[in-house]
Image: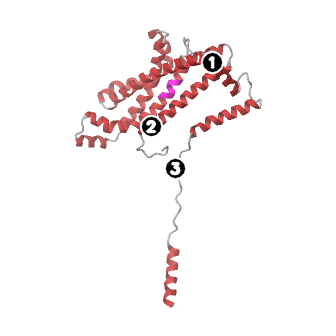
């Protein structure tokens, strides 16, 4: 009995001396919420509707959401809105495709060759320093006032962020991977496919998101200059007649297009870069 008592007495202080296990604090943002990015826009819409219903907003300056929806329905029914939307989508798509292709090719040529970097990087940096919308008068003189100059300006707006981010990602690839590829005897094509592209994809998607947003911002301005169709033209005509509701219809459509295209790029990024473990994933 005394032996058991002695053993218990010895074990009790030993247990008391053991360090307390600290509870690990979670620092990650947590599980992704479904449709979380819609919460902010829906909150703004709810506040807009509440302020309009309470009479806190001047209907002549900021019409109520239901007024804007009625205007959108009327423009869609008479065929004005579908034509302008398709025209704007076509311009944005052509300019985006050209700018994306140019940005990727220039980034590869500049990032994988010192000669290419010497010839390309400085020129692109100079182009970046010049306001793209300031080139509009010059492009009108060169290309006329038709569709060509609008697509060209959108392409420039797109290719600059794609090039800058893709080039930065290529320059940031660890040289140990390059040395490993040389030791393994990889060909140039295999090196680009297995090392360059995976290493540059994160930066490329950042540039792609900026380019998507930039294409819509450029389109808003371009369609108000010597245009006869498009959402920007519709808004410009509405400004002349003081139709605030029509202007808000155009702005909301631009916003929906921008949010939708950015969401598509984000989804594509998560699928392509599913091997990464990041806070966003």
Q: Residues within 10 Å of mark 2 (few under 14, many from 20)?
A: some
- Residue tagged 2: 269
* Eye-nearest disc, 2 or 3: 2
Label 2 close to label 3 by CB (< 8 Å): no
Residue 176 falls in image quadrant: top left
Name the secondary structure under disc 2.
helix
Could you tell me which residue is drawn at 27 percent across and 43 percent down? 180
Give the residue furthest to the right. Answer: 55
N-term mark: 1 or 2: 1
Which secondary structure class fits the magenta region best? helix
Across and down, in percent, residue 202 comes to 42, 38
Q: Which of 38/125 is in front?
A: 38
Residue 77 - label = 1
Whether residue 116 appears in magenta in the rendering, the answer is no
Span highlighted in magenta in the image: 211-216
- Residue tagged 3: 28
Q: Which of 183/83 is in front?
A: 83
Label 3 close to label 1 by CB (< 8 Å): no
* Eye-nearest disc, 1 or 2: 1
N-term mark: 3 or 1: 3
The answer for how far apart the CA atoms under marks 3 and 1 are is 48 Å
């Amino acid at each position: 009995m005394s032996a058991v008592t002695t053993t218990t007495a010895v074990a009790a202080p030993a247990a008391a001396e053991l360090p307390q296990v600290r509870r690990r604090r979670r620092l990650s943002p947590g599980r992704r919420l479904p449709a979380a990015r819609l919460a902010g826009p829906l909150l703004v819409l709810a506040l807009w509707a509440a302020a309009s219903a309470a009479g806190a907003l001047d209907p002549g300056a900021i019409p109520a959401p239901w007024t804007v929806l009625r205007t959108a329905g009327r423009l869609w029914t008479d065929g004005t809105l579908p034509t302008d939307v398709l025209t704007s989508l076509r311009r944005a798509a052509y300019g985006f495709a050209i700018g994306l292709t140019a940005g990727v090719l220039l980034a590869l040529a500049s990032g994988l060759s010192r000669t290419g970097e010497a010839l390309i990087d400085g020129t692109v940096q100079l182009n970046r320093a010049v306001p793209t919308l300031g080139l509009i008068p010059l492009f009108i003189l060169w290309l006329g006032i038709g569709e060509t100059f609008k697509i060209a300006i959108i392409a420039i707006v797109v290719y600059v962020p794609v090039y800058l981010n893709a080039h930065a990602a290529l320059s940031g690839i660890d040289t140990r991977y390059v040395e490993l590829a040389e030791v393994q005897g990889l060909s140039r094509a295999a090196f680009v496919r297995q090392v360059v592209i995976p290493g540059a994809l994160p930066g490329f998607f950042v540039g792609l998101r900026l380019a998507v947003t930039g294409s819509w911002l450029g389109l808003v301005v371009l369609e108000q200059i010597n245009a006869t169709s498009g959402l920007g033209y519709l808004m410009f005509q509405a400004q002349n007649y003081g139709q605030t509701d029509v202007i808000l219809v155009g702005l909301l459509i631009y916003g929906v297009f921008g949010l939708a295209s950015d969401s598509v790029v984000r989804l594509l990024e998560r699928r392509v870069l599913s091997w990464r473990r990041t806070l966003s994933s």
